[in-house]
Image (cartoon, rainbow, N blue to C red):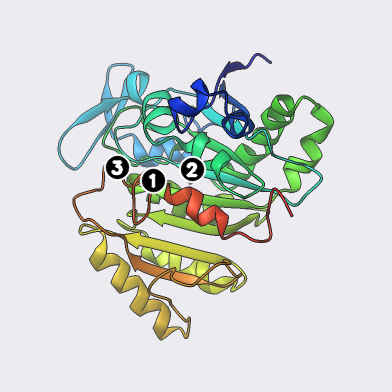
Amino acid sequence: MHLRIWPAAVACAALLAAGSADAQLRAGKTSISEFVTSPFPLDGSSSAATEYFNEVDGTKRGRKTATGRIYWENETYNDQRVLLHIPAKFDLRKPGVIVVYFHGHGAILERDIRDRQQLPEQISASAANAVLVAPQFAVNAADSNPGRFAEPGGFTRFLNEAAVHLSIMQGDQRTVRDFLKMPVIVVSYSGGYRATALAITRGDSEQRVKGVVLLDSLYGEMDKFESWITTDRKRFFISTYLGSTKARNLELQRMLKEKGVPVKGSLEGMRRLQPGTVVVMSGGNEENHRDYVQDGWIANPITDLLNRLRDFRAAR
């Protein structure tokens, strides 16, 4: 299996010029690899294909969105690649966690997730003993099609293949057993909400997902998120909102309180994310949706959240 390796994005060019040991420590390994179990493409027998492809032109299948835009399968829903990152400080001898990131609309792995949002760098800069797995969904399109993650067990199959790729990157394929057992946190940005809701309710057959983070991402599927939170109170859930997702977040907060679930309104004073914690909070500048992953309520919000995972520390 061939992996194409790029150096991870670094926080500051000046540190590199000075030969900073800290910058080198954060580098790690980053790859973009093709998966068999990626969200796309979908074969003809897939239930997800029947559900989401609603346009046909000869032999071409496509999806017509609510705005009337048509995205064709061979152009938009055929990218099998997944961004993977293992920080240099990652230690399999310590408790670890896999961060699975679902991107929003109009995204391409290299341009947006790796370079603009700097997900590998945010993972490496955190205190968490964490690795990153980020699949490509619809390519550069305004569509939240979840692909194979709408299929029962689809997300589990994806995680199992991710373990193989991570073990190869780690340099020892025997470590696949360690990655197969590792708990998972799903981070969703914007249009990634649908894939998240279906992955955790249809696809997580081994119940490895211990936390969900929605970054201005609650555009729907509230019943699925409510069910996931209330079914197992050992999981944590964080949802931040700007203007367009405020109403749904407040509605979800009301639904949870009616079920007797305590909901916090901020992360203030929360040094450790405890199991069962539920936070629904305003995310800051309402004009900042596009840059929210790297500049949300705080700079590098994913780093900030991972720093609160005291059970998964790279250094103790």
Packing grade of label 1 (10 A; few <14, some 14-19, many >=20) is many
User: Which of the numbered marks, if any, corresponds to residue 101?
Assistant: 2
The residue drawn where x is 59% and y is 17% is 5
At label 1, which amino acid type do we have?
A: Gly
Please indicate, yes or no, whether residue 302 appears anywhere in the rendered image.
yes
Q: Nearer the viewer, mark 2 or mark 3?
A: 3
Kindly state the secondary structure of the residue where label 2 is placed. strand
In the picture provided, is 286 more to the left or to the right than 197?
Answer: left
In the picture provided, is 153 more to the left or to the right than 218?
Answer: right
Dot 1 or dot 3, earlier in sequence: 1
Query: Is residue 7 positioned above or below 142 on the image?
Result: above
Q: Nearer the viewer, mark 1 or mark 2?
A: 2
Q: Nearer the viewer, mark 1 or mark 3?
A: 3
The residue drawn where x is 58% and y is 67% is 272
Do residues under tags 2 and 3 come within 8 Å of each other at their CB atoms? no
The residue drawn where x is 68% and y is 31% is 166
Which quarter shows the N terminus? top right
Which quarter shows the C terminus? bottom right
In the picture provided, is 27 more to the left or to the right than 256?
Answer: right
